[in-house]
Image (cartoon, rainbow, N blue to C red):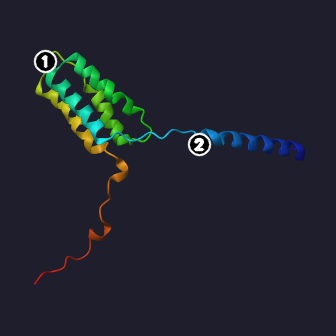
Amino acid sequence: MSFHKIQTNLAALGLLLLSATPAFSELEYVPIPTKEELRSIQRQAFTCSRTNDAEACRRTRQMVDPLMDHPRLPSSCKDVVWDLLQVAKTASKNSFQRRDSIDSPARRLSVICINPTRQKSPNPSNQGGLVPQQS
């Protein structure tokens, strides 16, 4: 490969990298859903499970669906969202099992999806070691 060809390829690579930089800076910040927003979804899911109404269940799926594509939510939250999307449907009989299959992921939604950056790890100083004796 000649020196001129290498230089041309490096120049093209440099231009490509320079043109890609603005694309990264234009990414939009998407806030994590607030506690109130998640609570609203929960209330709607509880209504769906309690009333077995097609409109209430459709509204639940409509409210929770955007969370599947949320760029900042962890996969554990999206797993709960997916579970809720799958079960928030009407049934011929509103059994306890059906209600529980909707209520369970709805309850986990507020526990797992609430601002994952604020969750604290356990204090390492309390792990292991000797326990002092009181006299």
Q: Which quadrant does the C terminus fall into? A: bottom left
Disc 2 crowd rating (10 Å Cα; few below 14, some 14-19, many 20+) is few
Residue type at mark 2: give it: Ser
- Residue type at mark 1: give it: Lys
Where residue 13 is drawn, which disc sits there? none
Q: Which residue is mark 2?
A: 25
Quadrant including the N terminus = top right
Residue that appears at 28% across and 30% down = 84
Q: Nearer the viewer, residue 11 or 114?
A: 114
Question: How far, Cα to Cα, is label 1 from label 2?
Answer: 52 Å
Image: 35 above or below 135:
above
Rendering coords of residue 32 (x, y %): 38, 41
The reply to whether discs 1 and 2 touch (Cβ–Cβ < 8 Å) is: no
Residue 65 lies, with reference to residue 16, above or below; the image says above
Can residue 98 be seen here? The reply is no
Q: On residue 93, which mark appears?
A: 1
Q: Could you tell me which secondary element the residue under label 2 belongs to? A: helix
- Quarter of the image for residue 82 reads top left
